[in-house]
Image: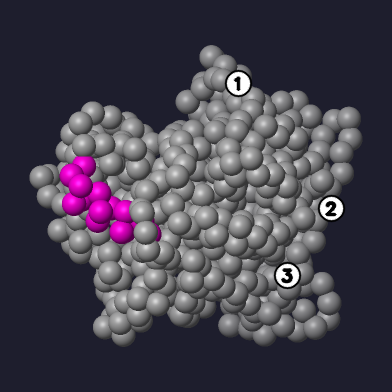
Amino acid sequence: MSTQSFRDRIRTGWRLTRARAPKGTRSLVWQPEPRGTGSVRRGQQILSGLWHLAGQLVEAPGRSPWDVTPPSTPFEMQLHGMGWLDDMLAAGGRGARDSAQAWVLDWGRRFGRGRGPGWDAALTGRRLLRQISHAPTLLAGMATRDQKLYFDLLYRQAAYLRDEWDEAPAGLARIEALTGLLYAGLTLEGMSDVAPAATRALTAAARDDVGADGGIAARNPEALLEVAMLLGWAIEALAAQGRAPDDLLAAQGRIVPTLRALRHADGGLARFHGGGRGRPGRLDRVLANSGIRTRNDSGLAMGFAPMTHGRTTLIVDAGPPPTGAASGSGHASTLAFEMTSGNCPVIVNCGPGGAFGPDWHRAGRATASHSTLEITGWSSARVGPLLDVGKRQIAPLIQPPRKVQWQRSASRRASTVVLSHDGYGRTHGLTHLRRLVLSTDGRTLEGEESLRAMTNADKEQLDDARADLRPRGLPFAIRFHLHPDTEAEIDMGGRAVSLALPSGEIWVFRPGQEMKLSLEPSVHLEPGRLKPRAAQQVVLSDALVSYAATIDWTLTRAQEATELPPTDAEGL
């Protein structure tokens, strides 16, 4: 759990003193509709005293959340960000309202003058958004004295954000801070001068942080969804005031087609670079509310190569991983892919492990946790030491692939993507090449994997790397992590693996030549659960004894679904 140092507390208190809110009447001049749609079930759990945040569960029936000792920093950050207000107030009823009022006011008394870990620009923006958008419910029946405290809290946070929003790192954190500031400028009496400045800053952030391809530097699909959601809220708020947010609409017009390209047939996002599938219903709402129905079919969407045929979607990491400050949750996943058939994920990556602690976070970032080729014990990029970035510590990716290439082609019978990366060049002098072919009926996926020392210098590097491994050669493995709902068993006398999906479909995986084929344990790191889910992985193992090795494999749908599940990849 993080703690606020005396120095940080003094600095935050000084900033709050400097960032004086305007004097005069304190009220709302405009009330936006609540934007966040919460979960009734989660709200009921919170009301019963079950706090399930960042993959951890704390039981505190009858207690203020601010009396709870957070089990981890991510839990603490989510608690102080107050995104859970959406869930609580979705549950409805006077009990939910009274508890929400009490806990917001209690936060103001304890932390409202700069104490505690919640004074981070992004967290302040997130918290202020919820407190403003739920203000009618939170103010209902509130005593006059408490209303004064509530409005003091809103104005103090708005004044802090006005002066300190630029302390938030570029990307999602900065857009979260600025969206909160914009809402304050549009709603709080006496702060109307804040809205134009916040709009300009938010527009600049969207222009700088959202690339021409609709992606962000972190290459995290779920973070891109959160950016799209916040920009959508800002656009709706400005439009309700009769303002034309053309530049924000342009950024939204870049993001939404890319989100569509990163959406699997089951409606969830591809899980790469620290992102999960997205909170249920959120992607649907963002796509529907945007009114944008186009899809990014340019070839690469934020560095990913999507292929869709029939009911099968394939999304491949075809770009270099993020680096620098944007890579704190980046994964060594170059050339990894995920595959979904209908509404059933089949091949996946293990996913983001941050909710389960630092060890799982680090393990989830390794190449071995992705569906791609791994030189045994090595990753295609390394996780570096912890660095201080603003008020946060991150472990950036270091030594990423220097060259990542891809090429796509299509015929009447199939779509093909050919990719390569040199992430093992520094350590072993090797390049990984991957060829994936998806038939136009979506029934067959063919793969070819190669490891090659491309130049004489590469061959010398490889000789040095495996000098102590002769005659066994350099071990490597090609991993195919399976979704936990997929049942797998070795078939055909050990020459194939049968995969049974919940829909009734049967897929059969076969290597193209005699080699070691095994089923091994895996895990599925799914945010929102209390612990990792047990899963399996298909592993092809071999050793490189010369300067090149090539392995091919096929994955074929052998039996159709007994009952076709609904798919919504193109429905919104």
- Above or below, comparing residue 561 to residue 49 in the picture: above
The image's mark for residue 407 is: 2
> Is 276 left, or right, of 442 in this rendering?
left
Q: Circle 1 sits on which residue?
A: 559
Residue 231 or residue 256, whichever sits in front? 231
- Above or below, comparing residue 20 to residue 65 in the picture: below
The answer, for residue 172, to whether it is visible in the render is no
The answer, for residue 227, to whether it is visible in the render is yes
Q: Earlier in the sequence, mark 1 or mark 3?
A: 3
Residue at point 74%, 38% (across, down) = 295
Work out which residue is located at the far top of the displayed protein and give it: 563
Residue at point 41%, 64% (across, down) = 22
Cα separation, mark 3 vs mark 2, equals 16 Å
- Above or below, comparing residue 290 to residue 405 in the picture: above
Type of amino acid under label 2 = Gln
Type of amino acid under label 3 = Asp
Q: Earlier in the sequence, mark 3 or mark 2?
A: 2
Residue 288 locus on image (x, y percent): 61, 31
